[in-house]
Amino acid sequence: MDPTLRPRIVARLKTEIAGFAPQMHAAAKYLLDHPAEFGLDPIRETARKARVSTYTFVKIAKYLGFSSFEELRAPFRAALVANVPGPANPDWLEELRDRGSAGAAFAESAQNALSVANRTLESQTLDELAAVADMLTSARRVYVTGMRASYAMAHYLHYIGRMALPGMELIPRNMGSAIDDLNDAQEGDLLVAITVTPYSRETVEACRFAQAKGLKLILISDSTVVAPELSPEYNLAACVLSSHHFACYSGMTVLIEALIALLIQRGEGQSRARVAAYDSLRRGSNAYWPERKT
């Protein structure tokens, strides 16, 4: 099988997805967001997960020049065979499964978190992460935003990242809107936006506003296709599949951890000095519970 077939399919869908009808758009987005599952699952399961009809995936296959869904799926299945498999089931997971319904639920969640983190890190490229870190360190000001559950990720990136980048700001501030806080941003500043399906309207609007003002945009999401009108310099994608209704953020967390590590590395001695200064300040102001002396 031609090894370039899968990336050519992905590239074409990314280019043309904006013009698809809603059902075709949903099917194409699922394929782009979950290539591993697409390579594994039969058409009925794929359609169920994408919340479209099986005919929609047949239509996608024919649109791309394939005779059937199986022919379209073949290069994605071949890529799975060639790649290193995900983490195996450790013994402690099997022991948990034998401890009733609570143990089974916990084991399923734990296995999913391990798999999601592994898949997210495996899909990143060092060159892209390094380029993002360089953009962040060279920007005059970096704004970070995320709403709802994604706010926790934005807050963590800002809380640690500002020690390496003093010009990093978390928005919205003071219960306002992100757009309000971007009003004074200048061309050449940078917005890091974090959002996962279903995408926050306020976050997407902040991205559009930032682009209109000439800011550079970096998206950290669960997809490389968030909104057709957004043109980020980089779009870092994390796997957020979960064993429950809401997104699993273990993949997003390890991705942000990797980015923070590169930021600290880029800052070298200055970043470490700022981290030490923050620590000294907090200890001097009794920010931490005192340790019992032995």
Image: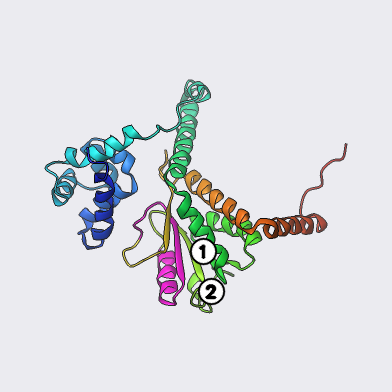
Between 187 and 196, the one lying in front of the other is 187
Residue designated by label 1? 135
Instruction: Answer whether labels 1 and 2 touch (C-beta < 8 Å).
Output: no
Residue 138 visible in the current orientation: yes
| x, y percent for residue 198 | 38, 55
Q: Is residue 16 above or below residue 7?
A: below
Q: Quadrant of residue 243?
A: top left
| x, y percent for residue 61 | 17, 46
Q: Is residue 203 magenta?
A: yes
How many labels sit on residues? 2
Residue at x 15%, y 52% (from the top left corner): 63
What's the magenta region? 201-226
Question: Where does the C terminus fall, quadrant-wise?
Answer: top right
> Element under label 2?
helix
Could you tell me how far apart the alpha carbons at marks 1 and 2 are, in whole angstroms? Answer: 21 Å
Does 200 sit left or right of 43 as displayed? right
For badge 1, the amino acid type reads Met
Residue at x 50%, y 44% (from the top left corner): 250
Between 25 and 266, the one lying in front of the other is 266
Residue designated by label 2? 181
